[in-house]
Amino acid sequence: MDHHTHSTAGPRELQMARSMCWHCQSEVAGEYFCDRCVKVQPVSKELDYFTCLGFPRRLTIDQHQLEAKFYELSRAFHPDFYQNKSAAEQTISLGNSAMLNTAYRTLRDPIERAEYLLDLEAGSVKEIRNSPPADLFEEILELQDTLNEYRAAGRASETESTLRAKLQSERHTLEQRQRDMEAILQQLFVQWDILQDRGEATDQARAERDRILKQMRENLSNRTYVKNIVSDLVSTIG
C-alpha cells in the first residue's frame, strides 16, 4: 500500500521549490504531493523555518503545537517510507526531512528561535562579542584575574580554597544576571508578538519594530557573553 497517496496526505500549505511537478510537469500549488502523479515535491530551500512549520514570525510558540506539526510533517517526508521509491523521490524525502529537522531544532529553543528571527529580520547575531557588556566590564576583568590566580594556585592550598569560594560566589552572581537577561528577553518577545499581531505598517510601527529588534540583539549578545563566562567558570572550578 502506498503511504503517500494524495487522498491520505491531504492539501498542504508549504511552499514548493518549483511551480511544476518535477516528474510529470503538472502545476503544483503549495502541496507536498503532485495531484496528477502523486510524487513527493521538494520544499523550497528559501522557505523560512517559521513558514516551514506553519507558524507566523512570533517568538511565543506553543510547544505542543510545534511538536504536533513536526511529527505530522515527519510522517509525510520520512525517508523510511521512500525506500522502494525512485532515487529522485528518495533524494527529495531526505532533503525535506533535513530541512524539517533543522527548522524544528531551531524553533523549539526560545533563544535559538529569537536569534533566527533576528537573522531573518535584521542580519546575523551569531557573532560572539569580544568584550564584556559595558556594565560588567570591570567585574569581568576582575573575574578573569581571579581565574588566572586560581589556575596558578597549588592544589588543595589555602589560596586555592579561598579563590574557589570567591569564584563560586561570582558564578552564582553571573547565573542570576543571565536569568535577569532572559527575563528581559521574554518581555521583548511579548512586545514583538503584540506588534506582529497588530500588523501595522506605519512609521511608528516600523520604529517600534526596529527598537525591539535592537534591544533583543543587544540582550542576546550580552547573554551569550555571560553564558560563556559561566561555562568557563564551571569547567574550571566544577
Image: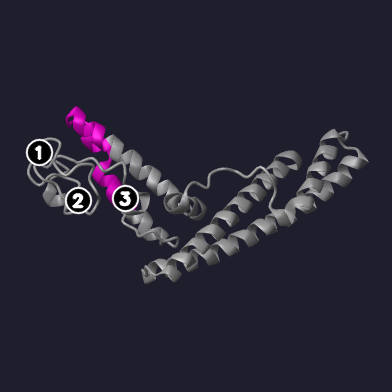
Under mark 2, the amino acid is: Gly
Please indicate whether residue 86 sits to the left or right of residue 234 in the image. left
**Which mark is first along the chain, 3 or 2?**
2
Disc sitting over residue 25 in the figure: 1
Under mark 1, the amino acid is: Gln
**Which mark is first along the chain, 1 or 2?**
1
Q: Looking at the picture, does residue 112 appear above or below residue 214? A: above
Please indicate whether residue 12 sits to the left or right of residue 50 in the image. left
At horizontal 25% and vertical 37% (from top left) the residue drawn is 93
Please indicate whether residue 222 sits to the left or right of residue 124 in the image. right
Q: Nearer the viewer, residue 237 or 230?
A: 230
**Callout 2–callout 1 Cβ contact below 8 Å:** no
- Residue 85: x and y in percent read 17, 32
The residue tagged 3 is: 52
- Residue 113: x and y in percent read 46, 53
Label 2 crowd (10 A; few <14 / some 14-19 / many >=20): some
Q: Quadrant of the C terminus?
A: top right
**Callout 3–callout 1 Cβ contact below 8 Å:** no
Disc 2 and disc 3: Cα gap in Å?
11 Å
The residue sitting at the top extreme is 87
Label 1 crowd (10 A; few <14 / some 14-19 / many >=20): few
At horizontal 92% and vertical 41% (from top left) the residue drawn is 158
Q: Is residue 77 magenta?
A: yes
Disc 2 and disc 1: Cα gap in Å?
15 Å
Q: Is residue 220 magenta?
A: no
Please indicate whether residue 169 sits to the left or right of residue 212 in the image. right
Under mark 3, the amino acid is: Cys
The residue tagged 2 is: 30
Q: Which residues are magenta?
A: 70-93
Q: Main secondary structure of the magenta part?
A: helix
Label 3 crowd (10 A; few <14 / some 14-19 / many >=20): many
- Residue 28: x and y in percent read 14, 47
